[in-house]
Image: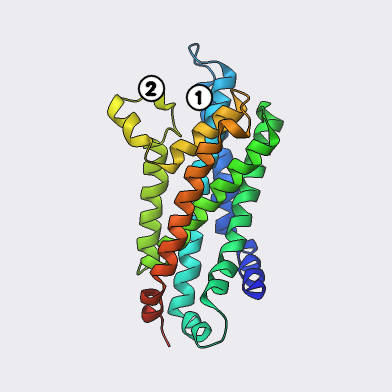
Amino acid sequence: MWAIARTELKKNIQDKGLWFWTFILPIVFIIAFVSIFSGDENTSYKEVVTQIIPGYTIMFAFYIMISMVIAFVKDRDKGMVSRIASTPLPIRDYFIGKWIPFLLIVLIQVAVLFGFGVVVYDLPLGDPFALVMLTLSLAFIVTGWGMALAVLVKTENMGIAMTQIIALGGAMLGGLWLPVELMPDFMQTISKALPQYWAIEGYKEVILAKGKIGDVLFNICILLIAGIVGGFISFAAYPRFLRLSKN
């Protein structure tokens, strides 16, 4: 398991495309949209920063799913999955070994983007424990869904397309681009079915309203449950994933 995790982490560190999606592009978006909306007289600077930085951090966290799809599909198409299946290594260890590096990457991504917000925009962070638990839950849900998507799709392009739908659709409907309160009523109802909504509302509660862990416990539970569902789907779909693997 740990050998798989180390190998996967080393590959990801060398992937320049992953660095672009994970750090460079989110920072560009944050700078651009804070500049655009900070001039709005009807919205305070603090509200703008608190909406945009966590919002785009959450949106780009979901793009880790692209890297997960590519990693799993390559293992399948190169016959790695079939070879591992013929060894005594439990399938649980294979999944955990592939999952851990991506979980770490998302945690680092959130830390870097929030750190950028603190240094450049004086972003308040609120209660550290609540913030850490929310971030762990966010990393858990995006990587859990990433594993599920990786074993369900047949091609990398299909996985990339589905990630775009999940990331951009969730950002639009989940309140990552603008506060949910400004949306039509029917969209506000839809947003509550999306993990992005519970993530952004949790971050805003901690950062803007100075909430504690008890104030965001429900948000954390929603994210964890959604991540667990993704994990169960990935395990359930593994036999089909194995059948598609080349020998």
Image height of 166 relative to 6, above or below: above
> Image point 36% across, 42% down: which residue?
169
> Image point 68% across, 38% down: which residue?
129
| Residue 18 x, y percent position in the rendering | 56, 57
Label 1 sits on a secondary structure element that is helix
| Residue 202 x, y percent position in the rendering | 54, 34
User: CB of mark 2 within 8 Å of CB of mark 1?
Assistant: no
> Image point 66% across, 75% down: which residue?
3
Q: Kindly identify which residue carries mark 2.
A: 182
Quarter of the picture holding the N terminus: bottom right
Q: Amino acid at mark 1?
A: Ile
Q: How is the image coloured?
A: rainbow
Q: Amino acid at mark 2?
A: Leu
Q: Kindly identify which residue carries mark 1.
A: 36
| Residue 34 x, y percent position in the rendering | 55, 27
How packed mark 1 is, by other alpha carbons closer than 10 Å (few <14, some 14-19, many 20 or more), is few
Q: Quadrant of residue 115?
A: top right
